[in-house]
Image (tube, rainbow, N blue to C red):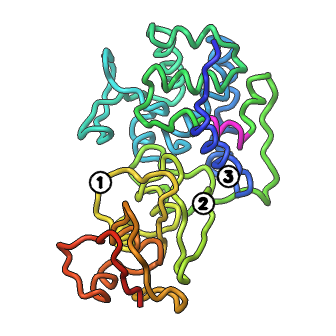
Amino acid sequence: MKIRIPSLFLANFLFISMLASSQSLNKAYLSYIDQYSQLAQKQQKEHRIPSSIILAQGLLESGAGQSTFSKSSNNHFGIKCSDWTGDKFYWDDDAKGECFRKYEKVLDSYEDHAKFLINRTRYAFLFDLKPTDYEGWAFGLKKAGYATDPTYAFKLISIIENYDLHKLDLGENYSVVNSENVNTPNPKNNASGSMGSIAPYVNHVVMKVNGVKFVSALPGDSYRTLADEFEMSENRLRKYNDDNSTFELNTGKRIFISAKKNKAPKDCANHRVTEGESMLSISQDYGIKVVELYALNNMTFEKGAEYGKVLLLR
């Protein structure tokens, strides 16, 4: 079975991979792979699940075994209770206080992960794929409903290719990359209670507008993950971007990682509002605080950006 990859998502994924390949790999990820790669290969031999997929899921769902969730439950694959009769662990995920399976040891989590996929008919088509077809497995898992994250497959593939996990599918041993390419994550990031909280690599290029640093949001980004990456609170990051919404970040959205300024650059004295623009989007374009943009134009907050109106920027 060949799963077709939409061109737009493929372009986004390739962009992520290109950025990630030029950055440092995460030491916690490498340690996890070294610890569990042989177990993953054993699972592949016994159950025909690619080693690369097993490890990528384990890394992603457990934050390389460092998240509070995985440490408390030994659950490295985010499997919920459903028909489970064993020990249970309650955690806020898609909803508050959701029930997850709890294991005595991590090995039990790996064994149950295989059984979970084998015993559910919705995953049956995956076992018709070759164990080396990690892309087919990644997109198949998403299609079958393993995760609600729309970018889940691309995250798995990105981890697999940046850590050469596909070599394990061929029976090769895993070798740690040169230590110069390894990044040791900040311990504060590891303390986060979220599942899969450790970033496998720094995947954002920092740019500037009006002298203010910003990054472009990538698929799967949230204010929380960006706050972790740049070592600040989520509230501060939201304040930098005048954003209190609960919506997911759109791919390509400009996210400032330092405070915007009170005025635009000297060569940007004004701006004519075009269709679809808002005071917030204009403030993001020029790196100006939205409250200052309103003040510069003597506007009340009830008013929006008026099509065709020329706004003062300084």
Identify the element where label 3 is drawn.
Answer: helix
Residue for badge 1: 246
- Residue 229 in the image: x percent, y percent? 52, 61
Numbered tag placed on residue 184 in the rendering = none
- Residue 248 in the image: x percent, y percent? 38, 50
Name the residue located 39 percent from the left edge and 40 percent from the top edge: 72
Identify the element where label 2 is drawn.
Answer: loop
- Residue 90 in the image: x percent, y percent? 28, 36
- Residue 196 in the image: x percent, y percent? 48, 44
Q: Quadrant of residue 307?
A: bottom left
Say whether disc 2 or disc 1 marks the residue closer to the N-terminus: 2
Residue for badge 3: 20
Looking at the picture, does residue 212 appear above or below residue 10?
below
- Residue type highlighted by circle 3: Ala
Residue for badge 2: 204
Name the residue located 37 percent from the left edge and 81 percent from the top edge: 310
Residue 141 placement, left or right of 202: left
Looking at the picture, does residue 191 appear above or below residue 37?
below
Looking at the picture, does residue 284 appear above or below residue 120?
below
